[in-house]
Image (spheres, rainbow, N blue to C red):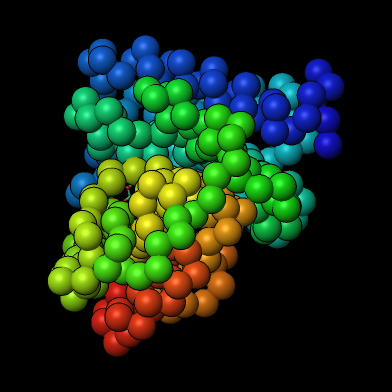
């Protein structure tokens, strides 16, 4: 599939992400308008601005493809089952972005009949572009990436994030407490998309989350899979684009985590 200007889909998506990322970079140090969507869930004027920009740029190059974005088109409005669909998170890690913590990214994914076929996750402050196409491997700035080769949780750096929902957050901390004597260390990332990309690139060895939305995980699922890792839902079943919980790691560590978390509330769906 080529864009209107004759470029490949991935090339176009990378250009759109770079363009949107430069806005995030410029706006990062400026004042933002913050609104609450829930008790802990915030959105800034920049989320809205960047989502609109991404949407318009994608529409220009691929007018026929539908769009789902965190801040404009809710997933409930969309039938993912039919044809191609963009799935976009203009800022993953808005809390960090709004607080001036330099760790956030933007996500653009493409699904076809509910299957993720291509995605990017771009960290504009580090100029790190994680990109992936189904069947073609996972890349960081065009260099192939792989999940870590660590053999056990004992050697592992574990990434997590806490759900906005209080129970979800507690259920996420529980496995950390149980694993604590057995892991190297844990990180609360602040961006699930980057948390998953870091597993894909072997920087961390395991990432899990109680409840994510399609735009948080669309890039991470494909990146970790194409980087040779395993991604499942909290029960250990095959992950889907709308599964609301995720476990990602290399095969050994994934299995060890499922074992150690068995019976905990984290695994109950
Ligand atoms: C959030 C981040 C965070 C995760 C939340 C997500 P947002 O996305 O990925 O790490 O814990 O569940 O909603 O709101 O910053 O786009
Ligand atoms: Ca997000
Ligand atoms: Ca977001």
In this picture, is 153 found above or below 62?
Answer: below
Which residue is painted at 46% across and 60% down in the image?
A: 149
Taking 177 as reference, is 133 left or right?
A: right
Residue 190: image quadrant is: top left
Q: Where is residue 32 in the image (x, y as percent from the top left)?
A: 26, 20
Quadrant showing the C terminus? bottom left
Compared to residue 63, the image places residue 188 above or below, namely below
Q: Nearer the viewer, residue 55 or 96?
A: 96
Residue 27 seen in this snapshot: yes
Q: Which of the pair 118/36 is nearer the observer? A: 118
What's the residue at 68%, 58% (across, down)? 115
The image shows a total of numbered marks equal to 0
Horizontal and vertical percent position of residue 20: 50, 21
Picture residue at 53% right of the left edge, 50% below the top: 146
For this view, does 208 lie left or right of residue 84?
A: left
Residue in the picture at 79% in, 24% down: 7
Residue 80 relative to residue 219: left or right: right
Return the x and y of residue 120 as percentages of the image width and height. Answer: 57, 37
The picture places residue 13, in percent across and down from the top left corner, at: 64, 30
Left-right relation of 43 to 133 = left
Residue 109, visible in the rendered structure: no
Instruction: Please say if 186 is above or below 55.
Output: below
In the rendered image, the quadrant that contains the N terminus is: top right
In the image shown, does 120 or 111 lie closer to the viewer? 120
């Amino acid at each position: 599939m080529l864009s209107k200007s004759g470029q490949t889909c991935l090339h176009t998506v990378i250009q759109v992400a770079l363009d949107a990322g430069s806005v995030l970079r410029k706006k990062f140090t400026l004042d933002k308008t913050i609104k609450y969507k829930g008790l802990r869930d915030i959105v800034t004027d920049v989320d809205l601005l960047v989502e609109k920009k991404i949407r318009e740029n994608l529409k220009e190059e691929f007018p026929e493809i539908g769009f789902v974005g965190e801040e404009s088109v809710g997933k409930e409005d969309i039938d993912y089952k039919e044809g191609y669909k963009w799935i976009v998170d203009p800022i993953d890690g808005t809390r960090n972005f709004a607080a001036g913590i330099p760790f956030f990214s933007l996500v653009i994914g493409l699904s076809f009949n509910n299957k993720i076929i291509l995605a990017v996750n771009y960290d504009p402050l580090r100029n790190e572009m994680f990109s992936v196409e189904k069947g073609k491997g996972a890349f960081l700035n065009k260099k192939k990436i792989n999940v870590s080769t660590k053999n056990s949780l004992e050697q592992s750096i574990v990434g997590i994030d806490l759900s906005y929902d209080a129970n979800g957050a507690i259920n996420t901390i529980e496995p950390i407490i149980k694993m604590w004597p057995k892991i190297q260390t844990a990180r609360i990332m602040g961006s699930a998309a980057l948390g998953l990309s870091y597993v894909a690139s072997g920087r961390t060895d395991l990432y899990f989350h109680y409840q994510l939305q399609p735009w948080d995980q669309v890039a991470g699922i494909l990146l970790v899979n194409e980087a040779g890792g395993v991604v499942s839902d909290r029960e250990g079943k095959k992950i889907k684009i709308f599964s609301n919980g995720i476990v990602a790691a290399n095969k050994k560590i994934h299995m060890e985590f499922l074992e150690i978390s068995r019976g905990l509330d984290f695994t109950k769906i």
